[in-house]
Image: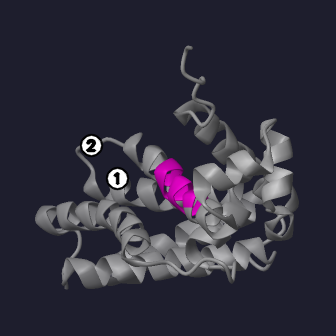
Amino acid sequence: MSPRPKLRTPELRARVLDAAVEVLRQDGPTALTTRRVAAAAGTSTGAVYELFGDKGGLVRAVFFEGFRLLGERFDRHHPTEDPRADLIAVLLEARAFVREHRLLADVMFSQPFAVFEPGKAELRAGAAVREVVLDRVRRCIGAGTLSGDPTDIAHVLLAVVQGLIAQETAGWLGTSAASMARRWDLALQATLDGLAPR
């Protein structure tokens, strides 16, 4: 008698995770149920539970998927001869990611689910994103365009980006793409100018 075929494959896990991210993107956190995700992935709720344990496990996987996708976007930006432009490009990539995946970013940064509390592994995923910014900041310090503690500067820049994203998402940063882009540029350039060597 041949063994039963394995049904809970890595391919099915990836399909369920893609479905969860899409359900979240289309309909928000309240729609992210195991039943809804299973239907979207063309599988059973039992398969979702077997793959992820429970809804908290599914949300945890979505959390990590968000940081994986953001990391992929950061990886597209290879260092050039202009460290300041490289730093700005990474910060604007964070903006583009949130514009495209606003509700996924909420899971990553705002923790809207009571069933999921980030632990050490999750905090390390967030730290990996900060490391990309920190690397670009260190290059700017090495080139003499920024001055100060690189960790402090990275935290400040990410706080500025998160504030701008919150303003833009709420509709308070402008009514046209041009006005919002102009205000992003103003904020980032002014912040970097303020962190330049005196």
* Residue at which label 1 appears: 86
What is the three-letter code of the residue carrying label 1? Asp
Pick the front one: 130 or 150:
130
Q: For the residue labelled by badge 1, is the local secondary structure a helix, a strand or a loop?
A: helix
Q: Find residue 106 and report its image quarter.
A: bottom right
Query: Does residue 197 show up?
Result: no
29 vs 135, left or right, is right
Q: Which residues are magenta?
A: 61-70
Q: What is the number of the mark on residue 80?
A: 2
Q: Amino acid at mark 2?
A: Thr
CB under 8 Å between discs 2 and 1: yes
Give the residue drawn at x 26%, y 55%. Answer: 83
Residue plotted at (63% across, 51% down): 50
Decide which of 189, 121 is in the foreground and name it.
Answer: 121
Asked whether residue 28 is drawn in magenta, I would say: no
Mark closer to the chain start, 2 or 1: 2
Residue 159 percent coordinates (x, y):
48, 82
Where residue 146 appears, as percent x and y from the top left, is 23, 73
Q: Quadrant of the N terminus?
A: top right
